Amino acid sequence: MPGHFEPLPGGGAAVALDDVEISIIRSLAVQLLELIGPGPGADAPADPLAELFAEGPSEPPADPVLRRLFPDAYSDPEHAPASPAEAEERRAHSAEFRRYTENDLRAGKREGALAVVRSLDALAPAGEGGAVLKLTPEESRQWLGALNDLRLAIGARLEITDEDDTELLYRLPDEDPRKPMVLAYLWLGGLQETLVSTLMS
C-alpha cells in the first residue's frame, strides 16, 4: 500500500502516507484553497436564492494557475479563428459561459480541496511517523478531483503544456530550483493514477 491507493472492501480506497507526504499534500491543498478564494458572499449570511442567480466573472483569471483550472470554454489552440468577427464571437461565448459556470466550478474545486484537508486532519497516527488514509467512495471521488487540480496547478507553474514538457522534467538536474515541484508533480500523478485504477476495479 505505501505510495499507492488500494481498494477497500465495500468500496473506497486506502493509502499509507508518511508524515512528510501528509504535510506536502495538506500544504498544497491549503495553497489551492487560498488561490481559489473563499467564494462570493463568504462573509455574508447564506441566501440560496441570491446564490442561484449570482453571476461570476466574465474575464479569464490573470493568474496562470487559475487560467489552467478555469479555462475558456470556447478557446481552441489548434484552430485559430478564421476572422476577427469569429474571434470576437468566441470571446463573447466564453465570457457568457464563464459568467454562469465559474462560481459553481470554483465551489466544486474548493469543496474537493477542503475534503482533502479535512480527511488528512482526521488521520490517526499509525506509528513510525505515518498513517493509513481510508476514503469512502465519495471521498475517493473528491480526492481524485483535488489531485487533478493540484497537478494542473503545479503544471501551470512549471509551464507544462504537453507530454514533451513532462519528458524534459525527468532530465532536470538535482540543483534545478524546480526539482522539488517536479517531484511533487510526478508523485501526485502516481497517486492519481492508482486512485483511478482503484475506483475502476
Image (cartoon, rainbow, N blue to C red):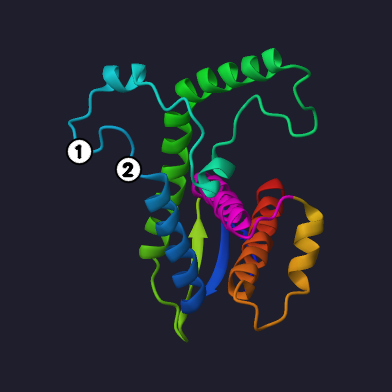
Q: Position of residue 131 (x, y in %)?
A: 47, 74
- Crowding at label 2, few (<14), some or many (≥20) Cα neighbours within 10 Å? few
Q: Residue at x 65, y 48 (%)?
A: 199
- Crowding at label 1, few (<14), some or many (≥20) Cα neighbours within 10 Å? few
Q: Is residue 160 visible?
A: yes
Q: Position of residue 107 (x, y in %)?
A: 41, 36
Q: Is residue 158 magenta?
A: yes
Q: Position of residue 23 (x, y in %)?
A: 44, 71
The disc, 1 or 2, on the residue closer to the chain's N-terminal end is 2
Left-right relation of 185 to 142: right
For mark 1, what is the residue? 43
Spatial CA distance of label 1 from label 2 is 9 Å
Q: Is residue 1 visible?
A: no
Q: Residue at x 47, y 62 (%)?
A: 28
Give the residue type that dot 1 points to.
Asp
Q: Is residue 145 magenta?
A: yes
For mark 2, what is the residue? 38
| Dot 1: element | loop
| Dot 2: element | loop
Q: Quadrant of the N terminus?
A: bottom right
Is the Cβ of the residue at disc 1 closer than 8 Å to that at disc 2? yes
Q: Position of residue 167 (x, y in %)?
A: 80, 64
Give the residue type that dot 2 points to.
Pro
**The residue stretch that appears in magenta:** 138-161
